[in-house]
Image: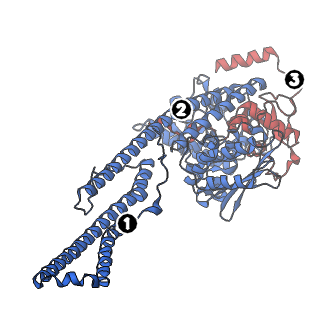
Chain colours: A red, B blue
Amino acid sequence: MGSGDKWVDRNSGPVVRPYALTGGRTEPADGEVLDLITVIVAARTAGEIDDAIRLSPEHRKILGLCRRQVTLADVASDMALPVGVVRVLLADLIQEGRITVVPRRAGGQQPSTDLLKEVLHGLHAL
Amino acid sequence: MGLSSPAGPERPYAARHSIRFRFGTMVIVPTACLVVLWGVLVTFGTGLDDHMSSLTHQQLAEMSVLVGGGLVVVIAGVILMGSFARRLSRDIGDLGAMAQHLADEQLPQAVERLRRGEEVALPDARPLQPRTRSKELGQAAAAIANLQHTTLAAAAGEARVRNGLRQVFISLARRNQSLLERQLRLIDALEQKASDPAALADLFSLDHLTTRMRRHAESLTILSGAAPGRSWSEPIPVIDVIRGAMAEVEDYKRVTVLTRAEDAVAGPAVADMIHLLAELIENAALFSPSDTRVEVRAERVANGFAIEIDDRGLGIGPEQLNDINQQLADPPDFDLANADRLGLFVGGKLAARHSVRISLRPSPYGGTSAVVLMPASIVVPAAEAGAAPPPAAQPGNAETGPLDLRSADRLALTGHRPPQPPVTAPPPRQAPPDGPVRNSQPSAGTYRGLPRRTRQASLSPHFKDSPAAAGRPPGAGSLPSSEHTPEQARDLAAALQSGWRRGRQAEPADAQPAASIWPAVGQDSGPPQSEE
């Protein structure tokens, strides 16, 4: 047997397969598929995370990450989990009111094409 | 192969007599007959008187000599026969004892050792030399020795076949496992990319199937006496071990894990414990209705750490329960004929490896409850486990380390940006000569190979760390950017130091300190811990 027959630490992959983290669910509990750049933050009222038995370690970790506003993409990257899994876990927390989605700015304030072009030129000029 | 047991009728041992007894009767019966005859002669001798008187004195003397001589010869014969009988009896007794010893102790021990895979020196063809002078007994001894030799040779042959078979099993299982691990890595990568819930659901099914296939491949290696193959060097939290086991079970959605424990399982035992728990959870799920739950609880106890698996099935009868407990406590040698209890056998074998105690008992819910008691030697208490890297469910954390919360703070300070990593952008023209240095940074990617974003890497220096450029979102600005928190100061110092070190390594001869400070400051957002 060569060393190729051993899978040590990272080579063994995650201890818990992603599907086990969500119990096989891929659809968010509230049915709303969050965008990658959705900004989320832990609800102010969430208080202490004492419900250790009901919340999985991943839920708790997400709550920890969301103490300040973060995007869904950042949470997924920090958790090193597939975005789909993080979406489902986040939806659980949102449903429980532990995390809220920060509303986006009104659509009317989107910059015009001219402005974007100008910025692009400026960037090229750098 | 296949041995047939002797079909002949049981030989009547009770009807047998010892050689000494037989010789005794052979000697005593004629002697007694002689004595009786003599007595008869003496008693009824009066009738012979006439006859006797007619004999001469000479004839009487001759007769007495003859009778005396006869008596001496008979007595000598008796003594000789007696001693011969004794010796023969002793020799045969020795031979019998030797054969008995061989059959009862030597052979079973040798076969047992062969079965365990140990080398056993085959004895010479004639190691038995009983102290006998008789040819027949010598032949019998040689025959027994031959028998021993042949039996051991057969057992050794069987052991070789077994061992060969074992190696074939291990080799096949390992190849299987190797392919499955590669498949899982591929699935990991696909899951990372999947954005559509339906696609992810398909991938999850694939993932689950592959994980279960891997478990069966591992079972085969364990049955063959080898380690499962996967291994961890760091302790893994118990809850992750349980959930890892749960993921390997077909009906994992029915399993609920209830624990507050933060203890961890020592790295070397993790793979075995995952497999052991998976077998028990599978058992629980298999023998309970599909609409009931299987609950797994875990808590620290005085003698180590206990994990309880409760099902709501019909339960097992007390006799069978006893039987199973016996099998779990002392796994017998693997019996290919008894393949329906494969899981229990694997569980027992793994438990024996780590001195884990498994006991099954009737559950209050009517089903069965399995309690796994792990010894303290393979459990790392929460306090010590806390010092280790956080849950390995996210192996990528090893790179970001305990910085997670702080990096979240920093992200909040700089506002939300698109997730595309700007490291791929071409470096600005007036960028300091740190490009190659930064690219050679070992932690430039995440665990799954994605490039890791370096904060402000593509900005020109005078924009860096400027709060105006960061565009803070409302509500996140509780920290004024002009102030430096202790964490930020430490990060900056760490980044400076690591930058110096890198600079010195890159240009050992003519590096100027001032030149290497810039790049270091420029990438203070890179995880400084990764340098350690």
Looking at the picture, which amino acid does disc 3 mark?
Answer: Gln
In-image side of B61 versus B432 (left or right): left
Q: Are marks 2 and 3 on the same chain?
A: no
Label 2 close to label 3 by CB (< 8 Å): no
Above or below for B234 versus B453:
below
Label 1 close to label 3 by CB (< 8 Å): no
In the rendered image, which quarter is residue B74 located in?
bottom left
Secondary structure, mark 2, is: helix
Observer-side mark, 1 or 3, equals 1
Which residue position holds label 2? B178
Observer-side mark, 1 or 2, equals 1
Q: Where is residue B316 in the image (x, y as percent from the top left)?
A: 75, 50
Q: Are marks 1 and 2 on the same chain?
A: yes
Please, which chain is the residue tagged with disc 1 on?
B
Looking at the picture, which amino acid does disc 2 mark?
Answer: Ser
- Crowd band around label 3 with a 10 angstrom C-alpha radius: few (<14), some (14–19), many (20+): few
Q: Quadrant of the N terminus of chain B?
A: top left
Spatial CA distance of label 1 from label 2 is 67 Å
Q: Which residue is drawn at 29% across and 68% down?
A: B85
Which residue position holds label 3? A109
Above or below for B203 versus B139:
above
First in sequence, mark 1 or 2: give its number: 1
Q: Which mark is residue B18?
A: 1
